Image (spheres, coloured by chain):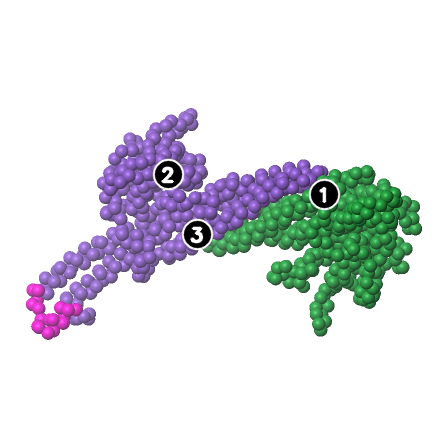
Chain colours: A purple, B green
Amino acid sequence: MEQAPPDLERQWQPATLEPLGHTDAGLQAAVGEEAEGSRDEVPGDGTEHALGLGVLMTENNFGLKKIEISVSEAEKRTGRNAMNMQETYTAYLIETRSVEHTDGQSVLTDSLWRRYSEFELLRNYLLVYYPHIVVPPLPEKRAEFVWHKLSADNMDPDFVERRRIGLENFLLRVASHPILCRDKIFYLFLTQEGNWKETVNETGFQLKADSRLKALNATFRVKNPDKRFTELKHYSDELQSVISHLLRVRARVADRLYGVYKVHGNYGRVFSEWSAIEKEMGDGLQSAGHHMDVYASSIDDILEDEEHYADQLKEYLFYAEALRAVCRKHELMQYDLEMAAQDLASKKQQCEELATGTVRTFSLKGMTTKLFGQETPEQREARIKVLEEQINEGEQQLKSKNLEGREFVKNAWADIERFKEQKNHDLKEALISYAVMQISMCKKGIQVWTNAKECFSKM
Amino acid sequence: MSGGPPKGLPSTGPHSLLDMPHPLAGSSSEEAVGGDSTPSPDLLMARSFGDKDLILPNGGTPAGTSSPASSSSLLNRLQLDDDIDGETRDLFVTVDDPKKHVCTMETYITYRITTKSTRVEFDLPEYSVRRRYQDFDWLRNKLEESQPTHLIPPLPEKFVVKGVVDRFSEEFVETRRKALDKFLKRITDHPVLSFNEHFNVFLTAKDLNAYKRQGMALLSRVGESVKHVTGGYKLRSRPLEFAAIGDYLDTFALKLGTIDRIAQRIIKEEIEYLVELREYGPVYSTWSALEGELAEPLEGVSACIGNCSTALEELTDDMTEDFLPVLREYILYSDSMKSVLKKRDQVQAEYEAKLEAVALRKEDRPKVPADVEKCQDRMECFNADLKADMERWQSNKRQDFRQLLMGMADRNIQYYEKCLMAWESIIPLLQEKPEAK
């Protein structure tokens, strides 16, 4: 199948899916224009996200207003699950504030509690309705890449705290995405506490989900995929692999570093004991020992800060997964298209054979005809007619599939470009903040050892 | 400090490195005061410091080490031969230039010993000989025999404890060379030991083995104190200062042992950290190969981590080569101190035994028999010598540990400074905007 050049006039209209955000044509137009790149009203870059701002489409008007979203608290709760068994879970408080343009003040507009599974539901919905978007990932479900001192327990307060930050980050990413921010279900997630789950399920999105997308490793013999997507899928696989490796080794490095610092604490104790039997050397030893204790305990804060860096890497580890999903979607669409084209071609051939009476391809009918005698001309006419109808239908479907495919490629690639820039920006920032952390650690080390040296000199 | 300065003997006490007089300069020495007692018969071979035969540039008496000169600061001075001008040092010894000798029977290392001296005990102003470890061992034994009342500095361990270490590796040989150098310098600094005849021969003889054989032929009458002393002796009362230093040494050795273990543990942890770092850095390189705009920043981070790894390796190497051996040497040093203390106890016990025997005989001779007097003299000499050595040991210990620990701090500072530089230098690279390229 040929690759159509990006067609700027066309707008993507999902034939079978209808995201709730598109309630009328006006909105669709807005979305369509937006997809072309006019981003005046809608902030869609990392800055907005970094500032904790997003945009939201209000229900009543089309005005886009700036909002602040925060996941401000986490609370342990107990309740009964679907099987009426008692369970413990953590609920997160989401607060939304609207920022007035005029005075910059923010007013609390909504506040509700959600648990992790609801976030997952929201994300799954977004994945189905926006398959061409690289959907922001959620923070990990279970603690992984943990170095020994940290707990892998989901109820551990540090884990809950980091998850709280991760969930806030997720909401901000969605809110600052030019397309996703307009979604109604997302809006309701932030504003409608009760019945939200039912509302989502009523969209029937689970039924529309392509189960084949879930089968990550299933291969499809696609003859002519868009090369860019093939490369991108390859890239996302490699990225996942390298970031996983990095996180694993980093956890081990953290472990070892912890050991080095903590063992120095033993100097504190032994210097203190030694100073007791010394006259002139005593004071110097004692105070040097104190510095060794300071050194040993400094590692806890240092490594806690580093967890933030690990979280930033993890986000992009999971983003790689989202990227891969978009590529998969393209593959599937392409596959369906090629199957449909193949089917159409075979029907046309069958039709031709029937019309001309030549049998070039083997068919059961042909065999039986040979064996048991020819069919009547009426029978043949009937069959040709059916085939011609099918061929017509097939050609229509192929046309619309083609259209869908091209639109998908265009829109997906636009979001991928946006994502690439975001990724480059974010990861650079992450590396810079990591370097800054290392610099701070070195400076602390110099300070402590300089202090110790001075104590030693007074021995 | 030690168990208190010896009573009645003026102690110059601790000085800072700056205002410390030259070891051979001052004349207010504890030893000189202790010179009330005549040198014991065993010390006939050695020169006493009361000897005015020596001619020194400033005409001063070659007094003892009144000042707490550290061997290491002396080390520094001795290594800068040219810088010494007008100082009264008259004996300089250096150990260097290790060489491997391969013979049919064995392979061994020799070290060059260079001696420069104006002392009359030396025929030539300069000597250069080659010695191997067993020669040092021989020297030490000879010194212990001939100077039983003095503390002899320790030698590095004879046998390599850990089977993994290569006797001929550069690091091992260098560590050993430094320890041997220190050993000789400590003897050089000692006002009594440095005049020992065996020491002189060690420094000057072309054929040491011939001298050794000669020495073996004569059964040296070093008296009772040569035997290796085991167990304690029943004493009526041990002088306070010796009791105190005995206790001190026990605790001191324990603490040093603990510090040695901690230091080893730290090095072990650092090496394991290094192993992980060496895997960590390259992953950024692998990642860099996948990226476009991020390629340079990621590669920069990889290189940076590589630099930190190298700095860490240097730190662990330094600590292993310089810190641990010196620590262990002090453990040996305090062990030798303890055995000298035991010998002293033995001498005192003999004296007391003799005294008791006389008392039991109930003779009303007012005069104390000559041999008891001799015993008393020996004991008092021993006490005086040992006190002096203890003082010297204490102040040397202080300087040595000050330097050792400051050195440890220094190395850690240097490590962090190297890492700091590496990370600071990549910040601009990371902040670079793609348009700028």
Classify mark 1: residues with Cα within 10 Å, few (<14), some (14-19) or many (20+). some
Residue A359 in the image, given as x and y percentages of width and height = 17, 71
Is residue A368 rendered magenta in the image? Answer: yes
Look at the numbered disc 1 and give the secondary structure of its residue: helix
Look at the numbered disc 3 and give the secondary structure of its residue: helix
> Tag on residue A171?
2
Q: Nearer the viewer, residue B402 or B383?
A: B383
Give above or below for A353 relative to A304. Answer: below
How far apart are labels 3 and 2 at the CA level?
24 Å
Q: Is residue A381 visible?
A: yes
Residue B256 in the image, given as x and y percentages of width and height = 65, 47
Look at the numbered disc 2 and give the secondary structure of its residue: helix
**What chain is tagged by disc 2?**
A
Residue at (35% x, 35% y) in the render: A76
> Tag on residue B243?
1
- Considering the image in quadrants, where does the C terminus of chain A appear? top right
Query: Disc 1 vs disc 3: which is toward the camera?
Result: 1
**What chain is tagged by disc 1?**
B
Q: Nearer the viewer, residue B46 or B326?
A: B46
Please state which amino acid type lies under the numbered disc 1.
Answer: Ala
Is residue B399 rendered magenta in the image? Answer: no
The boundaries of the magenta stretch are A363-379
Give above or below for A134 relative to B133. Answer: above
Residue furthest to the top in view is A103
Please state which amino acid type lies under the numbered disc 3.
Answer: Ser
How far apart are labels 2 and 1 at the CA level?
75 Å
Residue at (60% x, 41% y) in the render: A268
**What chain is tagged by disc 3?**
A
